[in-house]
Amino acid sequence: MAKTSFFRRIDWLLLLFILPILSAGLVTMKSFVPGSSEENFFGRQLIWIGVSLVIFFIFSFIDFRFLKRTDILVSLFVFFSFLLLLLFVLGHASHGARSWFSLGFFSFQPSDMMKLVVILILAKYFSRRHVEIRNLKHIFISGLYALIPFLLVFFHPDFGSAIIIFFIWFGMTLVSGISKRHLAIVGAGGLIVFFVLWTSVFAPYQKARIVNFLNPLANIHGSGYNALQSTIAVGSGQVLGKGLGFGTQSRLKFLPEYQTDFVFAAFSEEWGFIGSILIIILFGLVVWRILYNASLGATNFEMLFGIGVAIFFMSHIFINIGMNLGLLPVTGITLPFMSYGGSHLLTEFMALGILMSMRGYARPAHRDDMKNEFLGA
């Protein structure tokens, strides 16, 4: 019985789609600096993948229904908010941002875990109030839960992670049944907030990134350099790519942060248009499986959590690939499963592990029933 439960609990098709993406990131890192002990991204990433997969399977067999308890969620929210505050004092500065705790052999980024906590707390909030979600006050109350970590992360400054937190809140609010009138109000409020941020808060380099989005070639030796080198790398791959280990943009280090922010560009240069399309298709299949598992949720909480996880992945994928193609500002967002680093990998597999745990007590859900539950019909 235990063996049968094991195979039924895990979505093996989801794992099947993830493994080639993990492999794509590994082989790209392997081609960067062969034989270099200084930048052994391949070896360290392999360890993090192993640790993350172990966490994934462990989480899959923990009953996470206790996460529905308000006291547990509030404790998690307060704890990670405290860690984000602590970063202002003890955080390791990198590229002008204090987003990491440096522990010597390991660096930890609390904002990654806070994204998962925001998904959980919003799933809890909306699942209890889905019938009256059309009441405007619930949009602002839920927005407060997202605003606190948004501001803490933003002032590190980590604009990329702040944007992801906003997308998680906005996406989960939409699927919870927001009215079009309220959507217009929220949109207008967002424009006002952006105007205030632009005039009073944004640092010059952040404004430069946004201006560079509108005109990427305006300052190719300054704020537009990263986007230019990334688009050159993607374009030079042409249809079939230059071949593994022959990506000159990354090997010669014209492409900055080629192991994290711009790993998609480095991959595209070596594998070309065909390889890039295959990776994008695999990401689409991963999101599809996450949404499928969300649809099996035993209650609104499980369904909303799964949808929140899907929004989390879609936001990272869309923004990272967009900035690699020069279509979106460079925000320091990692590409799930491909970018180098342990914090984001652990968070991704923790989220999927919790989703697999919820799959263990899932129920078949009729589409009409799901619609009624979400919209309060």
Image (tube, helix red, strand yellow):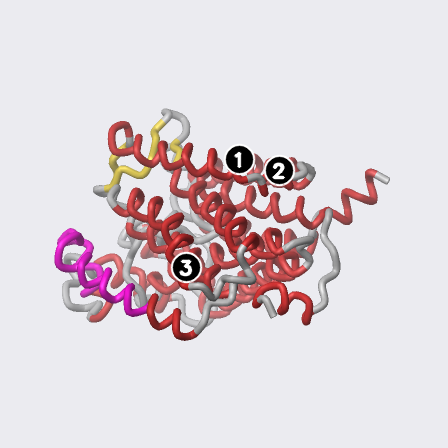
Residue 263 falls left or right of residue 191: right
Q: Is residue 242 visible?
A: no
For disc 2, the marked residue is 66
Q: What is the three-letter code of the residue carrying label 3?
A: Ile
Q: Earlier in the sequence, mark 3 or mark 1?
A: 1
Instruction: Name which quarter of the figure residue 288 lies in.
Output: bottom right
Query: CB atoms at circles 1 and 2 under 8 Å apart?
Result: yes
- The 10 Å Cα crowd at callout 3, few under 14, some 14 to 19, many 20 or more, is many
For disc 1, the marked residue is 72
Q: CA distance from mark 3 to mark 1?
A: 22 Å
Point out residue 284 in the picture as x, y percentages from the top left corner.
Answer: 55, 65
Q: Which quadrant of the rendered structure holds the C terminus?
A: bottom right
Q: Is residue 158 visible?
A: yes
- The 10 Å Cα crowd at callout 2, few under 14, some 14 to 19, many 20 or more, is few
What residue occupies the far bottom of the structure in this picture? 180
Residue drawn at 15 percent across, 68 percent down: 218
Q: What is the three-letter code of the residue carrying label 1?
A: Ile
Secondary structure under the numbered disc 1 in the rendered image:
helix
Give the magenta part as a residue range: 187-211
For disc 3, the marked residue is 139
Secondary structure under the numbered disc 2 in the rendered image:
helix
Q: What is the three-letter code of the residue carrying label 2?
A: Phe
